[in-house]
Every structure is written in structure tokens, then in C-alpha cells.
Amino acid sequence: RAKRVDHKQIRRITEHYLKRVDLWSPEAEELVFLTGLVESGYKYIRQLGEGPAVSFHQVEPQTAYDVCKNYLSYREKRAKLVTDALYLPDEAINDYSKEDWEEILWSSIGAGIVFCRLVYRRVPKPLPRIDEPIGMAAYWKTWYNTSEGAGTIDKFLSTIERRKDQ
């Protein structure tokens, strides 16, 4: 049986990386933490089965590649914060392949946190409030798991009841 990583430590590293890329807020930290909890239970860093997702946050390499090509490449300051935070060369944003991003996400807890947050950063709606778990669940389902994803709002809500970070 797979053991989980200590949730309080995950909260600390989530806050750390979100602050390093200047994307921290209480709402962002909560949503990124809960996303990892629902996506992997902080037990798995590669999607079970044949799926492409990697990291505790189950980021697909194609998604990380798209974030780089269609978001970060147009935001030099943000791109620099990301490469510095992840100890990558500046050219990683424009020159790395999907395979490169898969390796980075597979091997770096910080990369999963950062790219999870960047997925949410591109959403044209504000982050949900911390005290609205149904709002967090709906936001995750709509913008992260998507309509094609296997996750449900009910799964999100039942999973977060078992959190161990508080």
C-alpha cells in the first residue's frame, strides 16, 4: 500500500514555490494543495494506467509545454521567475520539448506545483474563496480536470475531508 507524503510538508513547499514565482495567495496555496491531494493523494508521481500525467499534481507534459509556448514565452518577467525557481536555464521556456517537461515534472515537486498554479493562472476567472469548498471543487473540475477528466466534484469534496495539513 502506497504511503502518502506528510501534508504539512506539502503545504510548506507549496507556499515556498508559489512565493518564488510570485503567484502566492492564500486561495492559490489552498487550491494547488487540494489539487495535488485530489489528483494523486500525494502518493503517486506518475498517472496510474497509461495516462501521460506526472507529478503529484498530475500535470500533462503537453500542458507544461503549452504553458511555456503560449503563456510564459510572452511574459518575460514571469518566465524568468519560473526558470529561476526551478533552477532551469532561461531557454527552457522556448526550447524544451514535451519530453523535457515530462522529465522535469517527474523529477521535481516544485515543477508540479508551479505548473499546476500556472494552469490556474491562465483561467479568466478569479480563484474561489478558501471557505467555499464547493466553489474550489467546481473550479478544479472546470479548469483543471476538465469535462473529459474522470474526476468529479463529489470526489474532490470527499477527498478534501481526509486532508491532514490542518
Image (spheres, rainbow, N blue to C red):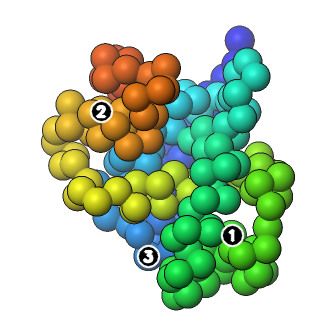
User: Residue 105: image x %, image y %?
Assistant: 72, 51
Quadrant, the N terminus: top right
| Vertical side of 17 occupied by 130: above or below | above
What crowding class fits label 3: few (fewer than 14 Cα within 10 Å), some (14-19), or many (20 or more)? few
Q: Are marks 2 and 3 in contact (CB under 8 Å)?
A: no
Indicate the amino acid at tag 1: Leu
Q: Residue at x 56, y 57 (%)?
A: 115
Q: Residue type at mark 3?
A: Asp
From the viewer's perspective, tell me whether residue 152 is left or right of residue 88. left
Q: CA distance from mark 2 to mark 3?
A: 24 Å
Q: Looking at the figure, which quarter contains the C terminus? A: top left
Q: Which residue is mark 3?
A: 22
Q: Secondary structure at mark 1?
A: loop
The residue labelled by disc 2 is 137
Is residue 24 or residue 125 the one in the foreground?
A: 125
Dividing the picture into quarters, in which one does residue 98 lie?
bottom right
